[in-house]
Image (tube, rainbow, N blue to C red):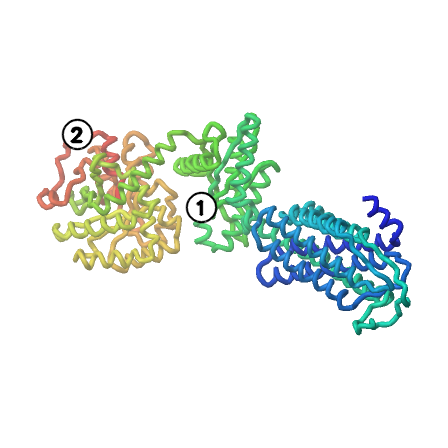
Amino acid sequence: MLTVVTCITQQHDISLVVAAGLICCLASFATINMLWRSSSHEARVRTVWLSGAALVFGTGAWTAHFVAMLAFRSGMLVGYDAFLTGASLVVACAGAWTMFWVFLNGRSNVRHRAVAGMLLGVIVGAMHFIGTEAMRFNGSIRIKHGFAGAAVAFAMVFCGLALGVSDRLASSSRRAAGAVLLAVGIVGLHFIGMAGLDIAPGSGDPLRESPWEPSGHLMLGTPLLATIVIATTATIFVLSLFGSFMDQYLAWRTGREEGSLRHIAHHDSLTGLPNRLALRHALEGILQEAQRQGAACAVMCLDLDRFKLVNDLYGHQTGDEVLRRVAARLQSLTRPTDVVARISGDEFIVVMPPTLDPDAAVMSARFVAALAEPMMIDGQQICIGGSVGIALYPRDGTDGGELLRNADMALYQAKRDGRGTFRFFDPEMNERLRSRQRLEQDLRRGIDAGEFQMYYQPLFAVETRRIIGYEALIRWDHPTRGIVSPSEFIPIAEESGLIVPLGRWVLETACREASAWEDDLQVSVNVSPVQLQQTDFAEMVADTLVRTGFPAHRLELEMTEGVLIAHPEQALAMLRKLRDCGVRLALDDFGTGYSSLSYLRRFPFSKIKIDRSFIQSLGECNESSVLARAIVALGHSLGMGVTAEGVETYEQYNFLEREACNQVQGYLFGKPMPAHYIRTKDRGFVPPRVRIDVEPAAQGRELHHSV
């Protein structure tokens, strides 16, 4: 060790030694950074970066070697064999390329890369000793084998460590450590090797300053070599600066692209809110913190109530603006620590982080109120509203998936309870949802298995006191549950879309069975709003009439105001098609909804039906009598027939007869019955004092829910 230090301090120019060390460090840092860039690319681009790293490393080690050789004070005129000098450069660059290729493409373990580094140390040693052999002076040179072996071993150890610690090049600290170790290995090899040189002056003529040796080989003098080294140093400097610049530029561009891609992957492009993926990560962190603190947190699921109507009426561009404004409103109501995310079309999630008492009810009430406020978009006033479902940690679940499911079930309950409200999760909701799912599966199977039957309730003309037709009512005879109320399966059929095939079956069965009745009897069939949204509904009705041979004028389709509110223009076009087919149209449950007179004026209805709720309270509530009287008068003034539903007492019938109501139906005139009974039933009026032996609750279930 002392010999090496003495060699450096006494036999070398210190300023050039420092210059050699700086060149070596610069080349090493540039090399490691280029290797890092090479590792992040494929095929051709990787080869370009690898070649650049090998060139910078080879020329850097070669330049550092010859700068240190120029620093060596031998006291004699020294020249260098051009061929061996060039060969040492080629060995350094080619060997470095080979070892770097092994480093990047071999097995990705520390041992394998360390071996590649050790072999790189051998190559640096070869470059050094070839360059040493290139020295030409008047004398002789002898290399001590012990020092030579120690020099190569030193280089192998440090180069092996350099590539070994650089197994994770993405780490800046590992890259810096690798560069330092690489530079130490190169510099240490040189000076240990130089300490092992024995130079003996010769007794002949001094070395001539001639470009040619006596043997005919080209020789580089010290000035020429210094010029080459300076040029090479400048080249390395430029390459290093270029590599560093490219490295920083690519790092900046990659970071920006990765940041942009990360933002796109974790955020909704329309509202800028976190998406489902980001919500999952955020929720995991919030639940871990809640568990650590022993605190509670709330997950709220929000859904817009009439968003589809906005898209249908005003277009998707307006719908997008509604979503952006909803997102802004939610963010304005929440705290910076709350998470607001959009996970689907019109569904949002708000997560309140851990607190001792998360006041989710207050927050949800604010959400509902904010969503109910109208929006002015392009001169149009948009009213939507929203519903909220709430699940609390740890009461309603301990993991994110369970809390989201339970909040969604609570949201479903809020919508069933009338929308524009919020509900907390209740364990019973889970069972109700499972029951609903089972019923939907049974409903799907029941349609295919033919488990449904049609019953018919008489319609009586008040003036003639005779049956003029029947209303078709569907019954489901479930194989294990028995008779299932339409109030249970009709909403499920509408939500699942099964109402379309079920409604088609009802219409065809009613028309086919009514074809066997007397020629003047009509049949009324209820139509769901979902059916009217089908663009081919009118064509389906016309095709059914043709296939069953049932006259169009004997078919009456009943629908509620919900059909008209959701899609007025589409409904108007559809109703006109049906009227042109010869089918009669009736507005059912009039008086319970908006009861807008504009509907009666715009839409081609031939009859309105007074809802049973007004009829049941006749004689008990003066308001019901006034409203029923007004509806009858309104229908007559518009030239429409009027039918009263749910007539169960003679007093109710007597009132309707005095008010000149056209038609009545209810248990006073007959229960729903199968089609085969209609052919034998007397069409005359039943005795006025007939006893109605049916419970009112049962009557309501029997009559009101139909398709």
Cα–Cα gap, marks 2 and 1? 44 Å
Q: Quadrant of the C terminus?
A: top left
Camera-side residue: 408 or 664?
408
Q: Looking at the picture, which amino acid does disc 1 mark?
A: Arg
Left or right for 334, reference 128: left
- Measured along the vertical axis of the image, is residue 410 above or below residue 276? above
- The residue that mark 1 highlights is 306
Marked residue nearer the N-terminal end (2 or 1):
1
- Measured along the vertical axis of the image, is residue 210 above or below residue 350? below
Q: Crowding near pointer 1: few (<14 within 10 Å), some, many (20+)?
A: some
Residue 474: % across, % down:
22, 43
The part of the image, by quadrant, that contains residue 575 is bottom left
Residue 693: which numbered mark, if any?
Answer: 2
Q: Which mark's residue is nearer the viewer, 2 or 1? A: 1
Image point (31%, 54%), residue name: 604
Outermost residue toward the bottom? 216
Picture mark count: 2
Residue 121: % across, % down:
69, 53
Camera-side residue: 482 or 686?
482
Image point (33%, 39%), residue name: 437
